[in-house]
Image: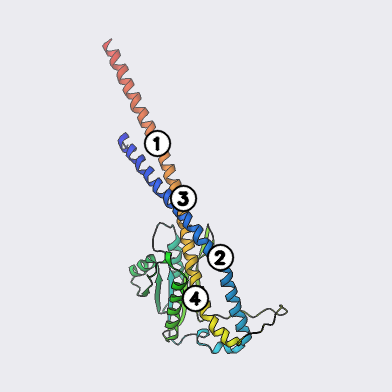
Amino acid sequence: MASIRDLRNRIKSVGSIRQITRAMEMVATTKLRRFQDKAVSSRPYADEIAGLVGRLASALGDDVADRPLFRPGAGERVALLVVSSDRGLCGAYNSMLFRKLEHWIGENPGVAADYWVVGRKGYQYLQRRGRQVERYLVEPPLEKMDYRGAAGIARTLVEAFQSGKYAKVLVFYTAFESVVRYVPTEAQFLPVQRAPAAAPGAPAGEALLEPDAATIFDRIVPRYLETRVYNALLESLTSEYASRRVSMKNATDAAKDIGNLLKKIYNRKRQENITKELLDIVGGAEAVK
């Protein structure tokens, strides 16, 4: 059994760990609020531009299929953009994403894939398993990623797709639904999937397009792709801090419970020693008599 000194040191260590995890929980909560506001505020724009692309595609009809970004690429390989975290201590955030990736690999045996990685944890995971990373997108860091950085990633993926090397491009990221729910997601980035046609009888308004639908469509599609990448990065970052906040809160609660248990053991041990010393004193006094 541990001595009183050992118990005292353990109680002190657990208390220090609790202070650290509590501080990390507060930092994660603050950053979560900031990134959550960005993610929520960007959704109306993303929904609107996606709806605009869908309406223009419907207006163009079969002409959309002739555009290179709307038909499968000439290559046989698949490009996978994996969005992970740069740091750990975020619970099962990364492991759930990697499980989603492994599930896709298991369902597509023999498919040659090139990995484009955002986040140090994803890069380390693929390196440990001997998988070749085509490009590690390290600048700017995920936490400092803005729309310009996301647009650069989108343009790079589009250029790689149009080069004829890839048949399609997929994105693996974590979709943020709430502070306690974040879902690993696989989404097709290229070729662009056409929106389903409107249901019969659905109201359709006529709009005057200037200069014309084809020109507007060709200009809006790159913005649509940039927005998709930006939202995937932003939602992944928000999910990371939501997971880290929960993980640090659980660690703080566990440290509190362990500290209370150690204090009970420490008090019981000290009381046993006091009782033993009192018995020795009483026994000595009786022996003198």
Label 3 packing within 10 angstroms: few (<14), some (14-19), many (20+) = some
Quadrant (top left, top right, bottom left, bottom right) of the N terminus: top left
Label 1 packing within 10 angstroms: few (<14), some (14-19), many (20+) = some
Q: Mark 2 points at which residue?
A: 41
Q: What residue type is labelled 3?
A: Lys
Q: Is residue 84 visible?
A: no
* Vertical position of residue 208 compared to residue 251: above or below: below
From mark 2 to mark 3, how far is it between C-alphas?
27 Å
From mark 1 to mark 2, how far is it between C-alphas?
47 Å
Q: Would you say 88 lies left or right of 220 here?
A: left
**Which SS class for mark 1?**
helix
At 28% from the left and 16% from the top, the residue drawn is: 284
In the rendered structure, which disc, 4 or 2, sits on the residue that comes first in sequence?
2
Q: Which amino acid does label 4 sit on?
A: Glu
Q: How far from the left and from the top, in percent, is residue 193?
A: 55, 80
Q: Which amino acid does label 1 sit on?
A: Lys
In this view, the residue farthest toward the top is: 289
Q: Name the residue under label 3.
A: 249
Label 4 packing within 10 angstroms: few (<14), some (14-19), many (20+) = many
Quadrant (top left, top right, bottom left, bottom right) of the C terminus: top left
Q: Mark 4 points at which residue?
A: 226
Front tag of 4 and 3: 4
In the rendered structure, which disc, 2 or 3, sits on the residue that comes first in sequence?
2
From mark 4 to mark 2, how far is it between C-alphas?
16 Å
Q: In which quarter of the image is residue 156?
A: bottom left
Question: Contact, CB < 8 Å: mark 2 with mark 3?
Answer: no
Q: How far from the left and from the top, in percent, is residue 226?
A: 49, 76
From mark 4 to mark 1, how far is it between C-alphas?
55 Å
